[in-house]
Image: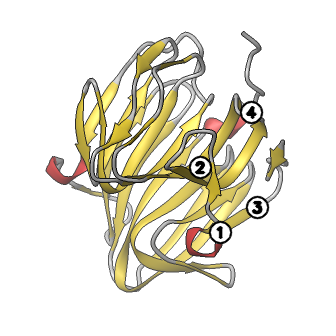
Amino acid sequence: MELNADFDKRVVMHADEIEWLSSPIPGVDRRMLDRIGDEVARATTIVRYAPKSEFSPHVHTGGEEFIVLAGVFQDEHGDFPVGSYIRNPPTSRHTPGSDKGCVIFVKLWQFDLDDRTPVKIDMNKMGMVRDADRPSVSVMPLFLDKRETVQMETWEAEAEINLDLPEGGEFLVLDGEFSETGDRFRAHSWLRIPKGGRLNARAGQQGAKVWIKTRHLRYVDAPVAT
């Protein structure tokens, strides 16, 4: 399966306009954003766990990165509430589920296969740093390595946000809204801008809280057969 697999194109996906699709696991549904592959896939997805649903134990050969958008995600490593940012590197193993139900934004098979760095951040407990070059923006760094930069930003009401993206970028609205190139992005809207692109956004009247990932679109590979 291929969905939004041309990474030279701008992609806009609004979660509230995407149908939920059943996964092979009862009680687990998906809104697919991009995908290369079938059940083993390089994928960006919003996943909904019904109460008491659970995946079988599995290894993330290509790594897993996710944000909890609603409810509480659970595995044998802990309970992760809304605002949790998690990176489970390649070769990590867990049994994910949710007693009361949850929604997560998840990216699979997008790691350096040699990465072994786990990350567990409760963004609700982390401070923001004012961006010295953008006075209407505050930043929360989440991850940085040779391949990618991941951070959460808050944009003040009606702030103008202009970013050159020589290596592309992804943007997920966590709260609030912004407009960009004629589109209105609200909670859980997702934008992918290709290499050489530019973000020209304006935050809404209540501002916006946005998860941002850059530099990683140099590396787009299908999953390795195992």
Residues at marks 3 and 2 touching, judged by CB atoms closer than 8 Å: no
Q: Residues within 10 Å of mark 4 (few under 14, many from 20)?
A: some
Relative to residue 210, is residue 107 drawn left or right? right
| Residue underneath mark 3 | 10
x, y percentage for residue 115? 49, 15
Amino acid tagged 4: Val
Give the mark, 1 or 3, whose residue is nearer the N terminus. 3
Looking at the image, is 77 positioned above or below residue 141? above
* Residue 23 in picture, x, y percent from top left: 62, 45
Q: Nearer the viewer, mark 4 or mark 1?
A: 1
Question: Which of the two labelled residues, at mark 3 and mark 2, occupies the earlier sequence position?
Answer: 3
Mark 3 nearby-residue class (10 Å; few <14, some 14–19, many ≥20): some
Mark 1, residue position: 18
Find the residue positioned furthest to the bottom: 205
Of 5 and 226, the residue lying toward us: 226
Q: Residues within 10 Å of mark 1 (few under 14, many from 20)?
A: few
Residue 13, compared with residue 95, is above or below; it is below
- Mark 4 or 1, nearer chain start: 1
